Image (cartoon, rainbow, N blue to C red):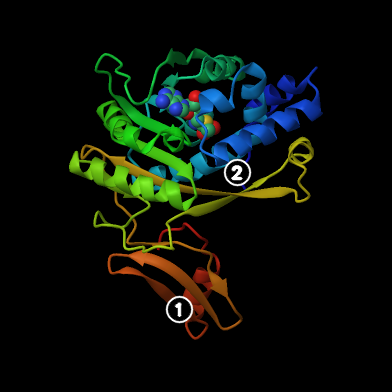
Amino acid sequence: MSELPAELRTALGTLLEGRGRGELAQRARHISQQYRANTPSARAVAGSSDAVAYALSRMPATFAATVAVLSELAARAPGFRAGTLLDAGSGPGTAAWAASEVFADLGAVTLLDGNPAFLELAGVLGDGHAVLGRAERRAGDITKFGLAGRRFDLVTCAYALTELGDAELDAATDRLWAHCGGALAIIEPGRPRDYRRLMLVRERLFAAGARIVAPCPHQRPCPLATPDWCHFSVRLPRSREHMRMKGATLPYEDEKFSYLVVARDTVAATPAHGRIIGPPEASKFAVTLPTCGLEGVGKVLISKRDPEAFRRARRLDWGDPL
Ligand SMILES: C[S@@+](CC[C@H](N)C(=O)[O-])C[C@H]1O[C@@H](n2cnc3c(N)ncnc32)[C@H](O)[C@@H]1O
């Protein structure tokens, strides 16, 4: 289970001091409702208290999903080095924190966001961190920005495209790719709407010369047909404070997300031959894995008659490569 780094937990804990828990919980509920209704963040998160409520309620989950995605990039492209990072739609800097967890050699970070309350909070949370404490914070619009032709080894865009209108997706995709010198990781909520839009982004990136890194094993059109959609799940622990804030009863949460990692052809990456695209079903006699591979989507049944394969299959999980 992926947990926030201790340094970030401490910084978030400090934010709680002197604030009414009830009010924060109410703000967090309100923000969640707004996000579910696809209200743009500028309206959903109107000031510093809202930004704090967002960070306390959502950062653990968006961090865990982003760590899962960036870990997949690191696994598929072992030689990849993330010296410079642009986190577009950074919010409080969640994806940059995730990148610093996955890539030990992360050097310079640029955070770009349209909401000044988030950029300010990113500065507070990163204060004292060896890399994030030096992050450049830029106000900008992901559909229009241009950072003087700069290209970054890694560009992340987590849970931000979801806030754009359909007509803005192409422009944002082009901006992200134009600033990517190595790999681009896009993470979105694991909903059918966001998956469908991500498939449009995928096509546009391929047309611009991007190569697939993950999750897909190929660059052909996605073989999934409605009502199916490609999404994954990551389990993370809930702190007591978080349980109280969300009115939750379980000590963990499951965050659903969709994602896409592409790269320029200068990055040596090997996409998985296949991927598990749903929860495996295990009985005493067999494991059934829903998979996507070069031949399309299907189910792979691994029987106990092959004890070694069965033992290995029991350890596989939703999202794992085959
Ligand atoms: C749901 S938050 C995600 C924040 C962070 N990336 C995370 O994963 O926790 C979406 C972020 O995207 C930013 N955003 C949305 N539309 C934007 C735009 N057109 N230009 C710049 N930032 C935008 C919002 O201000 C907000 O910080």
Of 190 and 237, which appears nearest the observer? 190
Ligand 1 within 8 Å of the CB at mark 1: no
- Can you say whether 293 is above or below 65 in the image? below
Spot occupied by residue 92 in the image (x, y as percentages of width and height) = 55, 24
Spot occupied by residue 89 in the image (x, y as percentages of width and height) = 45, 27
Q: Residue 55 appears in which quarter of the rendering?
A: top right
Are the two marked residues, 1 and 2, in contact with CB atoms closer than 8 angstroms? no
Q: Residues within 10 Å of mark 2 (few under 14, many from 20)?
A: some
- Can you say whether 179 is above or below 218 in the image? above
For the C terminus, which image quadrant? bottom left
Q: CA distance from mark 1 to mark 2?
A: 29 Å
Spot occupied by residue 219 in the image (x, y as percentages of width and height) = 25, 54
Farthest residue in the bottom direction?
305
Of 95 and 205, which appears nearest the observer? 205
Q: Which residue is mark 1?
A: 301
Of 195 and 293, which appears nearest the observer? 195
Q: Residue at x 29, y 18 (%)?
A: 146
Specify whether residue 290 is in view: yes
Q: Which residue is mark 2?
A: 2
Q: Residues within 10 Å of mark 1 (few under 14, many from 20)?
A: some
How many numbered dots are placed on residues in this image? 2
**Does 241 sit left or right of 41 as displayed?**
right
The amino acid sitting under disc 2 is Ser
Q: Residue at x 28, y 23 (%)?
A: 151
Q: Is tag 1's residue or tag 2's residue first in the polypeptide sequence? A: 2
Q: Residue at x 40, y 47 (%)?
A: 75
Spot occupied by residue 54 in the image (x, y as percentages of width and height) = 63, 29
Q: Residue 145 appears in which quarter of the rendering?
A: top left
